[in-house]
Amino acid sequence: MIRKIDIHIHPREGDVTMEKYLKIMDKHNVVAGLVHGLESEAYQKGYDANEYVLKAIKAHPDRFYGTVCVNFTKGTEKTLDMIKKFGDAGVIGIKLFPNLGFDPNDDRYEPIWQEVEKRKMLVFSHCGWLAPNTKDPSMRIASAFGASPFHFEVPARRHANINFIFAHFGGGATYLETLVLTSRLKNTFADTCPGWGRWVFENDLAGLKSMVRTQLLYGTDNAGEQYGVDDAWWTDKLMSMGFTYGDLQLYFYENAKKILKIK
Ligand SMILES: [Zn+2]
């Protein structure tokens, strides 16, 4: 089975240091994973995914890398506090849900990008439609507006040293923004995480063959025991699009290795 890095996983309740998940990864040759926080208590009261991320990366520093989820609607100062606190504790990036109601292109967020760049952190954003949070209806999900690659054009142009990763291939309706931005900016990347990330490939949407192969990343939102079938599906799909074995290695492993600075 091909060696893989999963750029898109989350902590799960009942597996605080991700021991159980690591065993599954071992079985399927997933050698490392980037674990993302979630907006605190956005999906479940009392479950602070950002704290869980820290526990996982501390328990297995050579296998798990982490991001902290920050919400720009809480203001630049609060966001900077979170980045400093979690950055000092060892996370290597920030995770965003612009669906909560902010536009990353807005100039007022420039101090955030400066801090991210100074700390050599990466940016990982949810992109596309997001189901409303039924467990906490008070949690505002404005719309998919903001959650697409073009809403990162300003910081991505200004900060060539920050790597921007668009989850779910940049979203279903907005996947073309991914193709355009990644073709022009070397510091932009996309993962193929389900649903939209897989959906655009399942439907063989126009333009996908032109995706820059050094900027495409394998991400699953916790494939778990499905890693095996998932691996086979993507291998077949990408080879049908003309990927060579070397291209597959870039996608499953090498591109992420570079981004995570794994030696
Ligand atoms: Zn996710």
Image: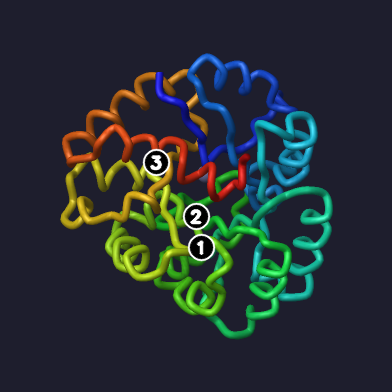
Residue appearing at x 55%, y 46% in the figure: 134
In the rendered image, which residue does mark 1 sit on? Answer: 99
Q: Nearer the viewer, residue 227 or 138?
A: 227
- Disc 1 versus disc 2: nearer the observer: 2
Looking at the rendered structure, which numbered label has been put on residue 250? Answer: 3
- Tag 3–tag 2 contact (CB < 8 Å): no
**Between disc 3 and disc 2, whose residue precedes?**
2
SS for callout 3: helix
Density class for disc 2 (Cα within 10 Å; few <14, some 14-19, many ≥20) is many
Gap in Å between the C-alphas at discs 3 and 1?
A: 30 Å
Q: Quadrant of the C terminus?
A: top right
Q: Looking at the picture, which amino acid does disc 2 mark? A: His
In the rendered image, which residue does mark 2 sit on? Answer: 126
Residue appearing at x 58%, y 68% in the figure: 161
- Tag 3–tag 1 contact (CB < 8 Å): no
SS for callout 2: loop
Q: Looking at the picture, which amino acid does disc 3 mark? A: Leu
- Disc 3 versus disc 1: nearer the observer: 3
Gap in Å between the C-alphas at discs 3 and 2?
A: 22 Å
Gap in Å between the C-alphas at discs 1 and 2?
A: 8 Å
**Between disc 3 and disc 1, whose residue precedes?**
1
Q: Position of residue 236 (x, y in %)?
A: 23, 29
Residue 39 left/right relative to 171: right
- Disc 3 versus disc 2: nearer the observer: 3
Q: Position of residue 219 (x, y in %)?
A: 46, 40
The image shows a total of numbered marks equal to: 3
For ligand 1, tell me if the residue under mark 2 lies within 8 Å. Answer: yes
